[in-house]
Amino acid sequence: MPAAYSQLSVKGGYSLSTLDIGVDVRSADTKKPVYTEFLHSYHVGLSQAIPLKKNWSLQADVLAHRGGGFLEIETLLDRTKLVLWQVRVPVTVRYELFEGFHLQLGGFIGHYFSSRYHIGGTSTAIGENFALLEYGYVGGGSYALSDELTIELRFNYADRDVVRQDPETGLDETIDGVALRGFFERTTDLSIKYTLR
């Protein structure tokens, strides 16, 4: 398809997610990092590319994105799996470095619609512990394998602490009595895009 035309694609693939999080186990002014592990996950959605001028274009996606990670907290006996579903909308500016290969840089905003943690064989909704919106930066690259297929690698770096604070006390919310002092999600997405038109 000529570069002068906008391109609508479906996309999906593998996501590697982890959590940059601090836990307060002693006092309100003390942070204690927790041990975290990667969560292997996935994403799926639509992508629209719009040409701007020679070698430059704009790409906007709407994705259902499953993120989270595993936590090991000193005060909890079992490992905790945290699963966060969000509608994520990344918008990037693309530069075609050479034919078929684009560098990308931009930002994203995400809306959490399901947040749960799994511990000791039980699953608990914790949406009230988190703010609804997340935002951050995204960067990466893509390479067109053919006119229809493109492979894309992106790094997503959340820039907002999404733990909700109690409006009366100003303190962070807790999971099983452990106060979360900071919460940032980092994800790497490897996608395949199929161009519809």
Image (cartoon, grey):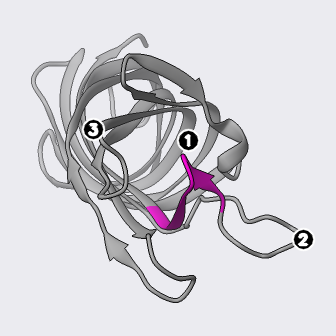
**Type of residue at label 1?**
Val
**Type of residue at label 2?**
Glu
In the displayed structure, 65 sits above or below 160; it is: above
| Alpha carbons under labels 1 and 3: distance apart | 31 Å
Q: Which mark is residue 176?
A: none
Q: Is residue 69 visible?
A: yes
Marks 2 & 3, CB-CB < 8 Å contact: no
Question: Residue at position x 86%, y 68% from top?
Answer: 167
Question: Residue at position x 73%, y 42% from top?
Answer: 128
Count residues near mark 3 (Cα–Cα under 10 Å), then give few for <14, some for 14-19, many for 20+.
some
Q: Secondary structure at mark 2?
A: loop
* Left or right of residue 55: residue 92: right
Which residue in the structure is indicated by mark 3? 79
In the displayed structure, 166 sits above or below 131; it is: below
Count residues near mark 2 (Cα–Cα under 10 Å), then give few for <14, some for 14-19, many for 20+.
few
Q: Earlier in the sequence, mark 2 or mark 3?
A: 3
Which residue in the structure is indicated by mark 2? 168
